Image (cartoon, rainbow, N blue to C red):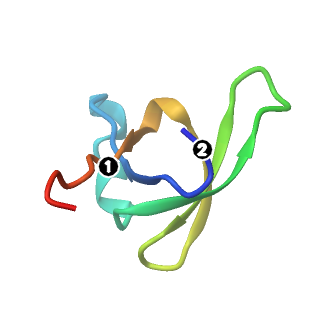
Amino acid sequence: MRVGDVVNFFTGAWVFEEANDRYRNPGVIVEVDDSHRQTRYVILWADGRITKEHSGYLEKEKENADR
């Protein structure tokens, strides 16, 4: 994933199920931080919040085939 990609927050783990409701999908990647062991992404969400997320919680939004 890279800057400008549209993503959704998702987790299938039952411990984090309530987190699915706290994020306003979709979001846009505004920064990629690969200076750590795992790459982190800075996301601007549809509600205006900005968070840092690991790739395991992000799904790249599927592009519409009609565009």
Work out which residue is located at the far right of the displayed protein and give it.
Answer: 35
Q: Quadrant of the C terminus?
A: bottom left
Residue at the spot x=51%, y=61% of the render?
28
Q: In which image quadrant can residue 21 be found? A: bottom left
Q: What amino acid is found at the position of numbered circle 2 in the picture?
A: Arg
Work out which residue is located at the far left of the displayed protein and give it.
Answer: 66
Q: x, y (%) of residue 59?
A: 37, 40
Q: Report which residue position mark 2 lands on.
A: 2
Q: x, y (%) of residue 32?
A: 71, 45
Secondary element at image label 1: loop
Q: Are marks 1 and 2 in contact (CB under 8 Å)?
A: no
Residue at the spot x=44%, y=37% of the render?
57
Work out which residue is located at the far bottom of the displayed protein and give it.
Answer: 48
Q: Is residue 28 left or right of residue 39?
A: left
Q: What amino acid is found at the position of numbered circle 1 in the picture?
A: Glu
Whether residue 27 is situated above or below residue 48 in the rendered picture: above
Q: Report which residue position mark 1 lands on.
A: 61
Q: x, y (%) of residue 15?
A: 34, 33
